[in-house]
Image (cartoon, rainbow, N blue to C red):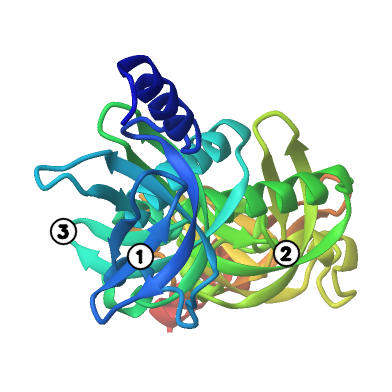
Amino acid sequence: MYTKEEKEKYDKVYENTFVAITDGELVKGLVVGLTKTDVVVNIGFKSDGLVSLNEFRDLANLRTGDEVEVMVVEKEDREGHLHLSRKQARITRAWERIVEVHKTGEVVTGTVTSKTKGGLIVDVFGMETFLPGSQIDVKPVTDYDQFVGKTMEFKVVKINEAIKNAVVSHKALIESDIEAQRAEIISKLEKGQVLEGTIKNITDFGAFMDLGGLDGLLYITDISWGRISHPSEVLKLDQKLQVVVLDFDDGKKRISLGLKQLTPHPWDVLPETIKEGEIVKGRVVNIEDYGAFLEIMPGVEGLVHVSEITWANTPINAKEFFKLGDEHQAKVVTLDKEARKMSLSIKQLSEDPRNTIEQKFLRAAVTTVW
């Protein structure tokens, strides 16, 4: 028999032999037993706790004596048992880690576990996170199933502390890599530098080229020395080309490219056969009120003035006489290689009727007298 004082004393000593725990606390425990459905865990409390075996599915070789981390859900449930959870412990640790990497910007590895409306579910540190469809790749993705089961790298781009929800992005990593490549390429750029690129998009005003992580614009006026109405006339998607850097802007990261600049200007290598007095053949590439321009060779044009179309004194409308794309022969009247100008004449391919008019009238008069 113990007195009341002695009992309180021994109860206190007994209580001190156990660890002090609170609900929601994370503690280390020792696996002391395994059943078909549960794992018996000793955390140094008055009684051992049971944890569902399903919460240890990631530990295929779990054995007695292993140390595990669990959360104290309740020190005593309705039946007076110690309620522990390894799943809640893993989620809590995972959330702490996710919050940390969100602050530091660290790259994490996760496994895509399933597809959901609008994106994918990714397991990161044992916690489910959301990967929106728009954050999978820099290119639009329509088939989400191809990513299920894959292990990929991500950045945590958004968290919600209240509901412990996190959004991850794989696209952000790709953009970071592209940005790094861009910075490296731009740091080495020089005007006049020749680069190899691939046509990735063709528009009315030019073509965008992939220079290996950096885009450049090849304007339509820098594609060919000759006139073209659309870049698709000479360029194709995915075509590889060597181009020259004409200009670039570090701040806006814009690069202007040139293709025609890799070859001499046609006026600088004009054949000796093209000279004043010679007859040439050209295609109509532009029509104005005052005349038409014939392209003798790509980049070399000559003007046929309305006064050089016919010997007739009747005014001629150039837009009625010429049609774009038509070919005409003409005589080179003037040629200035330095100014890159050439005037042509169609009427001078035939003799001026006024030079023979006297002879015609003389013959007619003689015939009349006889």
Q: Position of residue 153 (x, y in %)?
A: 54, 61
Nearer to us of marks 1 and 2 is 1
Give whichever of 296, 149 is nearer the camera. Answer: 149
Question: Where does label 3 land, which residue?
Answer: 117
Q: Is residue 316 visible?
A: no
Q: Earlier in the sequence, mark 1 or mark 3?
A: 1
Q: Tell me the quarter of the image containing the C terminus.
A: bottom left
Q: Residue at x 67, y 38 (%)?
A: 253
Sequence-wise first label, 1 or 2: 1
Q: Is residue 366 left or right of residue 176?
A: left
Query: To which residue does mark 2 refer?
Result: 332
The amino acid sitting under disc 2 is: Val
| Residue 182 in the image: above or below residue 20 | below
Residue depicted at x 40% and y 21%: 6
Give, as a three-letter code, the residue at label 3: Lys
Q: Please indicate whether residue 15 sits to the left or right of residue 189 in the image.
A: left
